[in-house]
Amino acid sequence: NPASYLANLFATYGHNQGYIKSYVYGYFAPFAFGLAAECYKASIHDFKEKVDALPENDIILTWDFNANPLSWLAISEMTEPTDQSSYYVVHEESSLGYSQIIESCIEFSVKFPVEKYGGTPIKVYGDRSGYQKTHMVKGDSYDLIAKSLKDLGYYHVELCTPRQVILESDAIDAANRLFYENICFLNPHLKGLKRSFSMTKLKSNERKIEKPAKE
């Protein structure tokens, strides 16, 4: 029926206002415009107080090797005690200034002390550029991350990184769906990530991130 059809459209495409304007209201609208993280709303998705990761929950450690300095985020899946629904929290981000993996892993160990999180499962993610033996590494970047974390005392490190190319448009849509469905939230001190969400734009009529030179 029409009601269920509309509900399905919003569930599938609600993270992109261009799709909704076109598919629901029949307007001629571009599918790529404005901010890349259009569904992120600080008033909804920023916590008022810091939430620490629970040692018993996996830490999802994501890396960006195209950034200089290196960039990482530490995320975990949390459970709401009242109704057992799950959501994701971005707990920590890398600070500016570190350009080598070992330095960044040490920074991670400061923010997630091994005394508390040494036995926590750490699942490492990132794009395929980490396999390209960059950043003055003899092997690939992911092997060095795993070795560095284990040397620091984290004994449950798992590489979950893909070797295939992930389309940038798919990654953008996936991130927006998390915010559209209100299942991803940010700790209040993550200034770099919040600035990125609030400023990073899409290329004109293209579902790819606009990356100005030297930014």
Image: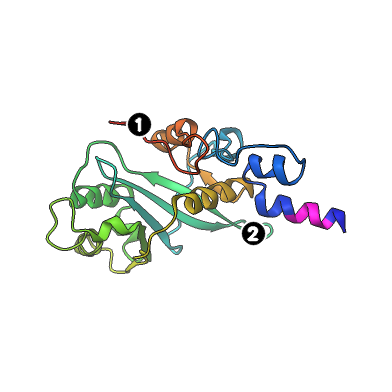
- Residue at 43% x, 63% y is 58
Q: Which residue appears farthest toward the right when viewing the image?
A: 1
Residue 192 seen anywhere in this rendered image of the structure: yes
Residue 138: name its quadrant: bottom left
* SS at mark 2 in the image: loop
SS assignment for the magenta stretch, majority: helix
Q: Amino acid at mark 2?
A: Ser
Q: Earlier in the sequence, mark 1 or mark 2?
A: 2
Going by the image, does 65 lie left or right of 178? left
State the mark number for residue 85: 2
Q: Is residue 5 magenta?
A: yes
Going by the image, does 23 lie left or right of 119? right
Q: Looking at the figure, which quarter contains the C terminus?
A: top left
Q: Does the residue at mark 1 contact the one at mark 2 (Cβ under 8 Å)?
A: no
Going by the image, does 70 lie left or right of 124? left
- Residue at 78% x, 53% y is 7
* SS at mark 1 in the image: loop
**Vertically, is 120 above or below 44?**
below
State the mark number for residue 212: 1
Front-most of 73 and 199? 199
* Chain part drawn in magenta: 4-8
Q: Amino acid at mark 1?
A: Pro
Q: Looking at the figure, which quarter contains the N terminus?
A: bottom right
State the mark number for residue 151: none
- Residue at 43% x, 32% y is 195
Looking at the rendered image, the disc whose residue lies closer to the viewer, 1 or 2, is: 1
**Vertically, is 137 above or below 69?**
below
Instruction: Report x, y in % for residue 110.
Output: 27, 48
- Residue at 52% x, 40% y is 37
Query: Spatial distance from mark 1 to mark 2, Cα to Cα?
Result: 39 Å
